[in-house]
Amino acid sequence: MKKILLIEDEEIMIDLLQKKLIREGYKVSVARDGEKGLKAMKEARPDLVLLDIIMPKMGGLEVMEEMAKDQELSKIPVIVVSNSGQPVELDRAQKLGAKDWLVKTEFDPQEVINKVARQIGK
Amino acid sequence: MAVAKGKKERIRRGEEDKVSILLEDLASLESYARDLFSFLPLPVCLISAIGIILDANPSFEELSGYRLEEIIGKPAEEVFDKGRLGEISKQTLEKGFVRAEELSIFTKNKKEILGSASATLRKTEEGEIVGYFLGFFNLAGIKKREKELRETQVALANILEDVEEARAKAEEEKNKTGAIIINLTDGILVFGEEDKLSLMNPLAEKFFDIKARDLIDRPISELSTFPTLKPLIKVLTEEVGEIFRKEVSLKKDLTLEMSAVPVLRKKERIGNLIILHDITREKLVEKMKTEFVSLAAHQLRTPLSAIKWTLKMLLDGDLGKITEEQRDFITKTYQSNERMITLINNLLDITRIEEGRYIYKPALTEFEPIVQFVVDSCKGEAERKKIKIEFRKPKKKSRRAMLDIEKIRLAVENLLDNAIKYTQAGGRVIVSLKNTPKEIELSVKDSGVGIPKDQQGRVFAKFFRGANVIRMATEGTGLGLFITKNIIEAHGGRIWFESEEGKGTTFYLALPIKEEFEGFLREF
């Protein structure tokens, strides 16, 4: 069973994504800010990270900067879940190694599943 | 005797000759005097010692209106002012003459003429007083002229007074204008002949942190040596045009809106008036507003996403089976939510446009596939509304242009959305692409409701919605065309339209092909 770490601070998004991903047969763990996310990453070694950008304590982009410094963590594929979808932001995420991104208002949950499956399979 | 007689005779004859010569001389003298008397332009009459007119010359006849035969024998006091004449007569008889005494004459038709009289006594050879000559100098003309002169003088004095008054008024007006200019809450610069600075008000001095006296009468070209003036001079000398308005950022905390207005006298340009309006506060408020909208929009997106995803999962059956009625309601809610998301996205686009960070990544691209994509994606909606869409492509493939694909797609989408939205069932929309030497031109022609003539000037304004469509479709934010125009202009392109209410609208947009776009960028 593939492990996904969801780093997201919005309760309802956590609920929805968790539910959807579990239904699709993934094992999901959740971190509610960037700091906790990094810690969870080191402990749980997920197959994929779903990463929000704007979060308390440490934002998604900073999380990716930290990941890039760690040889092991830098190998974990990241899909950015962005709220704003601003080009500047997406561009930066891409440069930091994000495999894919989705803008919350523009995608629906099924597309998230499709993108996840494209990265790590079912 | 005979000799004596002869001598006597000779003498006598000599005497006779002398007498005859004398007589002749006398006769000719008399005729001379008479001629002179007749010819004299000065009216003269001879008055006897007891005051009877004995003779008068033609000038006197003319002046008095009496003929000679009427006047001879007439008492002089009937013709002249009695009192004055008595005085003159008395003096003349005593002294022998008078010079330039005032005297009035009454003409035959009872007109009084004021004049100056001179008189001289006339005696016989024996010293017997015959009377006196009276010469009359008509002063009426002179008096009249004098009167006119006095009137002219008065008029002149009046005019001078008026001029003085006008000058005082002008002075006052000038002071008033000066006070207005000095106290104006806008900075003023006036460039006169040869682009020399002729006026600068204190506020302008403050803006540029310089003293007007250091600059007055200096031409524009010299002014750029003052560092604070540089940004202004740059705009002034590089940007031509009759009347224009531009924002100039002078310092970090000072933004001015500069308006240049030509000063005309009888259609001839005699200078330039530069008005500098401090818009620092407005800019700050605008920035705060933009930031607020941006923040609010971002904050709104999160709950909207949550709603969207929740509804989607409900509809997908991820959260359990739902009834048809529930599905119906949820579908409608989902659509409402989508509209809200579109509105928020539009607002975000606008704040980006206003922050000047909208066009993000232009790439060398063909325009046609973008249009094709949009036409295809609109077909479903058009079919649902029973509207025919036609896409007319040029025979020759268009050259490529530097385009931000996402943004251009949005621009074309907005035009097509509008065409479909505001055309009734059974109508048609024709999308055509055309190549011109330097541009690719797209037109979107509909047979829709059109834009009311009185509103056509505001079509591209933010939140504009035609009065005739507000009633028709509840959807629409009034932001689409504003965004579209900004996208097209950021690409160096142009957008315009033709419309007639009730017949339809055609929107055109022209995008420069590659070389032109680079030229456009260089201008920045």
Image (cartoon, rainbow, N blue to C red):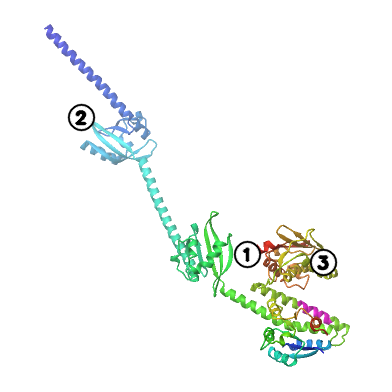
Q: Residue at x 86, y 88 (%)?
A: B320
Q: Which residue is mark 1?
A: B522
Amino acid type, label 2: Glu
Q: Kindly indicate whether the residues beneath marks 3 and 2 are on one polypeptide chain.
A: yes
Quarter residue A69 falls in: bottom right
Mark pair 3, 2: CA separation: 133 Å
Label ID, residue B396: none
Residue B328: give x, y in percent of width and height: 85, 81
Q: Kindly indicate whether the residues beneath marks 1 and 2 are on one polypeptide chain.
A: yes
Q: Dot 3 lies on which element?
A: loop
Is disc 2 surrounded by few (<14), some (14 to 19) or many (20+) residues within 10 Å?
few
**With respect to residue B211, does B34 lie above or below?**
above
| Marked residue nearer the N-terminal end (1 or 2) | 2
Q: Residue at x 26, y 39 (%)?
A: B99
Q: Is residue B501 visible?
A: no
| Marked residue nearer the N-terminal end (3 or 2) | 2
Q: Which residue is mark 3?
A: B424
Considering depth in this image, is B366 or B456 the residue closer to the camera?
Answer: B366
Residue B372: give x, y in percent of width and height: 80, 66
